[in-house]
Image (cartoon, grey):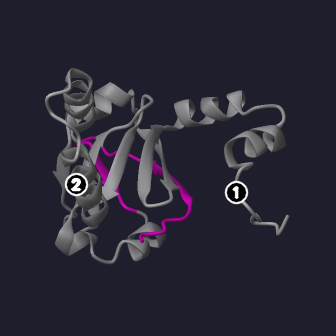
Amino acid sequence: MTQLLGEFDCKLDAKGRLMVPAALKKQLPNAENDGLIINRGFEKNLVIYPKNVWDAVVADLAKLNIYDQENRAFVRAFTRGATELSLDAAGRVLLPKSLVEYAGIGSDLVLACQLDRIEVWDKKSYEDIFDDVPANFANLAQKVMGGKKGGADGE
C-alpha cells in the first residue's frame, strides 16, 4: 500500500502548473511512468491519486449496482473532472483549469498527504478547516477509533 507523508506549501505558476516538491516526488517513484490522476474531493478541494490507487478506487466503483440511481449519481459525481496528470521534464504538473476553479485554488496552495492520496487545497481554505478542529480532539479520536484495539500510543 502506498503511504504518503507530509504537507507541502506550493505555488501555481501563471500557466497553472504546480512544481511537485522533491520530498513528495521521492514518495511517488512510479509517477513519471505510471502517471497520476486528479479529481474533485469531497470538500472544496482536489485529490491526486497515484495511478495504482486510482485503479483500486475505480475497481470498487465498478462493483456498485449501476441499476441503482444513487450509485449512478455517486459514480458520476465522484469521477466528474477526473484527469490524468503527467510530470514534465521539470517535475511540474498542469492542473486542469476547471478543477482549480471548482476548488477555488489561487496561486498559493497546500498539498496534504492523506494515507495513499494527496489533497490539494487553496492555502487559506486549508488553514480555515483547522479552525474547525474539535476543541477536544481526544473525544473525536475515541468516537472514530474507539472500537479499535491498541492504538498508536499503545493504549
Q: State if disc 2 and disc 1 touch (CB < 8 Å).
A: no
Magenta stretch?
1-20
Of residue 34 and residue 79, the one placed in the foreground of this image is 79
Given residues 149 and 42, the one toward you in this image is 149
Q: Quadrant of the C terminus?
A: bottom right
SS at badge 2: helix
In percent of width and height, residue 34 lies at 19, 70
- Identify the residue at horizontal 23%, vertical 24% (top origin): 73
Between 147 and 6, the one nearer to me in the picture? 147
Residue 141 occupies quadrant: top right
Q: Quadrant of residue 151?
A: bottom right
Considering depth in this image, is 25 or 43 the residue closer to the camera?
43
Look at the picture and state if 92 lies above or below 63.
below
Residue 143 location in percent, x, y? 73, 39
Q: Position of residue 85 (x, y in %)?
A: 20, 55
Element class at badge 1:
loop
Residue 59, disc: 2
Q: Height in image: 16 above or below 105?
A: below
| Amino acid on which disc 2 is placed | Ala
Task: State yes or no: residue 16 in magenta.
Answer: yes
The residue type indicated by label 1 comes to Lys
Looking at the rendered image, the quarter that the N terminus falls into is bottom left
Question: Which residue is label 1 attached to?
Answer: 148
How crowded is the residue under tag 2: few (<14 C-alpha within 10 Å), some, or many (20+)? Answer: few
